[in-house]
Image (cartoon, rainbow, N blue to C red):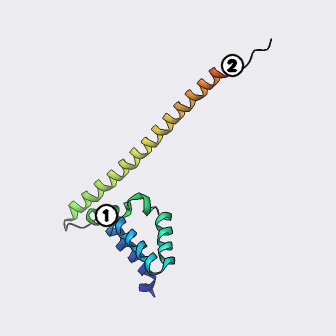
Amino acid sequence: MNAVASWPGQAEQWLDQRGKGAWIAAMVLGFIFFWPVGLALLAYMIWSKRMFSGCKNARKMKTAKYAFHSSGNSAFDAYKAETLRRLEEEQDAFQEFLKRLREAKDKTEFDQFMEDRARRAPASEPADA
């Protein structure tokens, strides 16, 4: 039962390792042999964002495969794990910084829009005579 339950996950991992082209080929073959399978694969690719993202999961899996592979030297492995953890924290902090920067820029642009709108509003209203 365990092998039967894990075959979809294994198939997904196998396709991810081969990239977006493998997913597209599987979808086309699904349409050729039994159209509901092709339709289901297309829906899954769109839902999981594989259609538009370039299979980032596959790249992460390849990177993780080499990043967490033991070198046999425990001191080096500990150093590597600590460095990777620190880099992930720095990446998260940088992503948060970029988010705050985008929000600040959006707020500045919106405030400028509202100021321009407020300046134009009195000039465009007809005077009561």
Residue 105, relative to residue 115: is it above or below? below
Residue ID at (41%, 76%): 29
Residue 102, relative to residue 39: is it above or below? above
Disc 1 marks a residue whose amino acid type is Ala
59 horizontally vs 44: left or right: left
Quarter of the figure that contains the C terminus: top right
Give the structural element (helix, strand or loop) at label 1. Answer: helix
Q: Which mark is residue 64?
A: 1
Instruction: Give the residue number, with chain letter if any, for mark 2.
Output: 122
Disc 2 marks a residue whose amino acid type is Pro
- Which circle's residue, 2 or 1, is located before the other in the chain? 1
Q: Hey, which residue is sitting farthest right in the picture?
A: 129
Q: Hey, which residue is sitting farthest front in the picture?
A: 32
- State the CA–CA distance, disc 2 to disc 1: 60 Å
How many residues crowd around disc 1 within 10 Å: few (fewer than 14), some, or many (20 or more)? Answer: few
- Counting from the top left corner in percent of width and height, residue 116 is at 59, 24
